[in-house]
Image (spheres, helix red, strand yellow):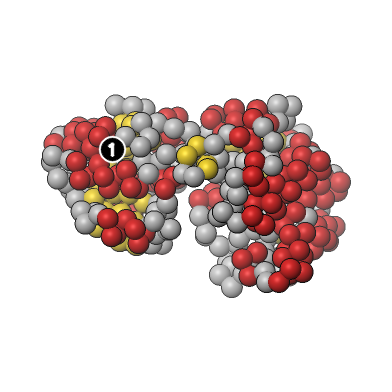
Amino acid sequence: MKILFVNKFFFIKGGAETVYFQERDAMLQSGYQVVDFSMKHVENKPSPWEEFFVQNVDYHDSHGLMGRVRAGVDFIYNSQACAKLNTLLLRERPDIVHFHNIYHQITPAVIGVAKRFGCKTVLTAHDYKIVCPSYTMLRDGRVCEECLTGSVINAFRHRCQQGDTFKSLLLSLEAYWQKFARNYAMLDCIIAPSEFMRQTLLRKLPHTRIDVIVNGIDASTTVPGDTAGDYFLYIGRLSREKGVSTLAQAQQKMTQKMPLKIVGDGPLGKDLRARFSGPEFLGYMKHGEALNNLIRGARAVIVPSEYYENCSMSVLEAMAFGRPVIGGNIGGIPEQIRDNVDGYLVEPGDSDALAQLMDQLAADPQRARDMGMSARQRLEEKYDLARHMQVLQALYQQLVGVTT
C-alpha cells in the first residue's frame, strides 16, 4: 500500500508535526510505501519528493494592496499546491492521501484534487479549524462557539485574527469557501484524536465519518523517573488560553512553596516574567534529552489549559515518564487524565483550587509516585504509539478494501 502524507511543514513546528512524523516514520518501518507533499522551507528535513513541494507561503510578509490580494487568493485556494499535487499523484498513484496540517498555505482545495484522482482521503484534525476560522475556538482569551453555532462572519465581526480587519475578513471568506466547495465533506474519514473533538466536528459535519484515534507516544523509548521529583513543570506556549498566568498565581498561593519551572515562550512571556518572580522561566526548549530529563525529574506536570485542548501531547509526555498531571477540566484533557488516579482535574482559571492540588502533591511524594505509576500504565494501555499505528493501519486497510 502506498500512502501520500500531506502537511504544510516538513519539520517539527508543533504537536501536529510530531504526530505527522511519528506516523510517516512508523509506516516506513512497517514496510509501507510513503510519499511526501509539503511546503519548501529552510528547516525542512530531506525528502525524495521535495521537488514537488510548493513555494513557501508567509502571509505576514505580504505588502501593498495587490500583494495582500494575491496572498488572500492563495490563502483560500492555492492553485500551485493543487497543480503540484496533481503532478505527484500522476507519478506516484498512491492508494491513500492522508492530510494533516494543510490550512492556509496548502489549503483544503487539495482534498478535491485527491478525490478526483480516485484516492481514498483521510484528514487528522489537530485543531478546530473545521469549525472555527481562527483554529482555537477562542475570543478575547475565552472559549467561543459563535462560528460553530452561527455564521462564520463572526470571525470578521470580532476581528479574531490578531485584531486585524483584513486578516479576519480572509478567515471568514475562507470558511465560506470551504462550506461552498465542500472539501471537508468529501473526505472518506476524519480522524479526531479525542472524543470531544469528534463530537464537536459532528456538529458541523453530521454526515461525515469521524473516527477517534488518540495520539500516541513510543513507550519503549521512555524511562520513567525513579524519584518523586522536587519541582512542578509547565511545558507549552506562554499565551492566555494556556492558563500560565493562573498557574503562576497558584504557585504564589501555595503553602508548601515547591519550585515551578516553566518551559516555553509566547506573547505573554515578557509580561509573565515582569509580574511573577516565583517561577523559573527556562524559555523555549527543543525536544531532546534535556527536556526529557526535566519531565522525568518533576513532581508533576501542570497543563492548566483554559480552552478546548484536543489530545494534549504534553499530557502524554508526562505520562510516558511516569509523572502525574494536573490538567484543566476542559476539552479532551478529561479523557486523558482520570481524576484522582493519574493526576487531578481542575476547573480552568481557578488559581485557588490549583494551588490546593499542587500543595497536596508537594506534601505527599508517595501519592505523586503512585499517580505517576498509574499514568504510565494508562499510557501503555491506551496511548502507546504501537497501538495508535495498529488502529491507523486498520483504517487504511478498511478504506482500500484490504483484508488481513
Q: Residue at x 19, y 50 (%)?
A: 259
Residue at the image position 52 percent from the left and 43 percent from the top: 139
Position of residue 215 relative to residue 268, above or below, is above
Looking at the image, which residue is at 58% across and 67% down?
45
Please indicate, yes or no, whether residue 52 appears anywhere in the rendered image. Answer: no
Q: Which residue position is annotated with label 1? A: 351
- Residue 241 visible, this angle: yes
Looking at the picture, how far across and down is residue 256, in whole percent? 13, 41
Q: Could you say where residue 323 lies in the image, as x and y percent from the top left?
A: 29, 41
**Mark 1 secondary-structure assignment:** helix
Q: Amino acid at mark 1?
A: Ser
Q: Nearer the viewer, residue 293 or 149?
A: 149
Viewer-side residue, 111 vs 290? 111
Residue 51 x/y as whole percent: 73, 70
Residue at image x 28%, y 60%?
Answer: 274
Q: The C terminus is located in which quarter? A: top right
Of residues 130 and 89, the one drawn nearer to the viewer in this rendering: 130
